[in-house]
Image (cartoon, helix red, strand yellow):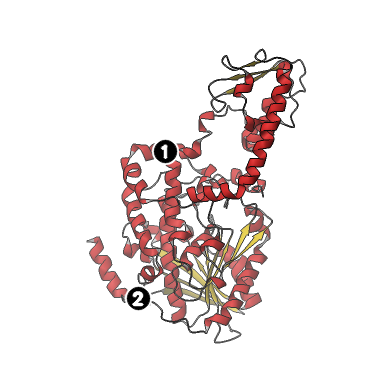
Amino acid sequence: MPPSKLDSLYRRMLITRFFEKGWGKPENLRRVFQFRKVISSRESCFKLVPRDYPVEITKKEIYAESTLIEGKFKTPLELHLPGVVPKESQQAHFQLLIPNKWKNEKHKPVCIHLAGTGDHFFWRRRNFIAKPLLKDANIGSIILENPFYGLRKPNDQTRSNLHNVSDIFVMGGCLILECLVLFHWCERNGFGPLGVTGLSMGGHMASLAATNWPKPLVLVPCLSWSTASAVFTTGVMSQSINWDMLETQYFSDGQYRERLSKMVTVIDDAFSAGQSFIQNFNQSLHELKEDISDTRKIQEHENSNTCGDKYETQGTCAQEESSIFLSKSLKNTKLDSDNLTIDIKDTLSQKVAIETEGSSKDASSALTKLMKFILPLSAQNKSDKIDITKTNWWEREALQFMRGMMDECTHLKNFSVPFDTSLIIAVCAKEDAYVPREGCSSLEDIWPGAEVRYLDAGHVSAYVLHQKLFRSCIIEAFERAKKVYENDIGEVPKCDITYQQLLKKFDKNIQ
């Protein structure tokens, strides 16, 4: 289905700009890329967070039917990668909302809710998801504040405008380890079964966090997919990135191009292109035949009048240089061949000029009609000239570097498969323009056994209108967890290090 126009319109209304300061420090990126190989393996990542990791309770409020607890702890990522996490983001803050009375004392389900883009503080998730879950299904909720958001937002950051591309990866690394801390804390306090969910960016962060828990875990990622690379390169979010600045920084500092670019890999590239070719070959061949047939008809019609008088092509006849890919768009457009001049230099991709010579003011040019098929709506409404040198911007090396970075640190193929994929219910929007799925690996292929449900909606409309559906999927997944939670899951990996030993290791790293 075509991308939602509402998503594109909503994105243009926002003034949020991402990565205004560039890629981030090369040394920090190098450390993050190396650390990704550790946290992407469940066996090695689980050992990074001790079972006795301390959590401080700062506030407790008891209401008629529920109890609200607030707490905090130091993010483990700062202990493993000192200096990468901003000072303001080093303390993780969360709220726990639980019923005053559990329906079954042996069954105390708790779900962690991770924030989507722009979801600062706790009130939105608490009121729209956590409270209804508690009321309808007796499910407790932990609302974790994202790094760089709300109480953890750096002082020099405006709203959700992350300064560097590296901030996304730091955020993800923090949340992966912080979820492990909270899972351990929940088990120490007798909660279970456990789960994790989120919307949009929060959904993808939830998927990453779920890969490293070595027990059955409910996972309900909503409005996310298998990688974040498409979000920032082909989705509407790419419009809020200063690509010229990123490209300038990429080529001005050799460390990005010569060193860091060799540490990342684009996952869905040649493989997906080959898949798409195979799947669409017959259809493409049929359309190609139609194009050739239509083009010949146009040429025969024009050649019956003149050949060369009205079409000038640097000394060659129009039929030698005519482009078959234009015939589809022009097939339903009435052309006035007596008042049309086309000047083609070298190739159509360099410059096409169409001049109309007619006295009728109501008749629109063929170019105008053609551009309505090609240009996005925003470009049609602008009177400024379009910089045609940017039509191949996706081929720039800096954009490929962005794709490689995002795939390296966020693609689910680079992480372990969750322990029990039968407890996964993903919800996606068919017309999502924020999270494009075309050309990306599917969740069903990466996680066999996971269930993916699709909404006939865009990203924004799904977020606004389908909160009840998201909650019902969470409830259904926890019902599934009841059947497997008490079963023997076999040997669980052990974390040999204690919190005090981790602190000693941290002290050595910063000396």
Asked if one can make out residue 148 in the rendered structure from this viewpoint, the answer is no
Q: Secondary structure at mark 1?
A: helix
Q: Is residue 74 above or below residue 274?
A: below
Which residue is pictured at 59% across the width and 70% down the height?
130
Q: Position of residue 225 (x, y in %)?
A: 55, 57
Q: Position of residue 403 (x, y in %)?
A: 46, 48
Q: Is residue 485 above or below residue 456?
A: below
Q: Secondary structure at mark 2?
A: loop
Q: Position of residue 285 (x, y in %)?
A: 63, 41
Q: Check disc 2 and give the amino acid type.
A: Cys
Question: Which residue is disc 2 drawn over?
Answer: 495
Q: Is residue 139 left or right of residue 358?
A: left
Asked if one can make out residue 285 in the rendered structure from this viewpoint, the answer is yes
Quote the CA–CA distance across marks 2 and 1.
43 Å
Q: Is residue 18 left or right of residue 46?
A: right
Q: Quarter of the image holding residue 80?
A: bottom left
Q: Quarter of the image holding residue 399?
A: top left
**Residue 247 circle label:** 1
Q: Residue furthest bottom?
A: 105
| Neighbours of disc 1 within 10 Å: few (<14), some (14-19), many (20+) | some
Which residue is pictured at 54% across the width and 47% down the height?
237
Which residue is pictured at 66% across the width and 66% down the height?
469
Q: Position of residue 271 (x, y in %)?
A: 49, 51
Q: Check disc 1 and give the amino acid type.
A: Glu
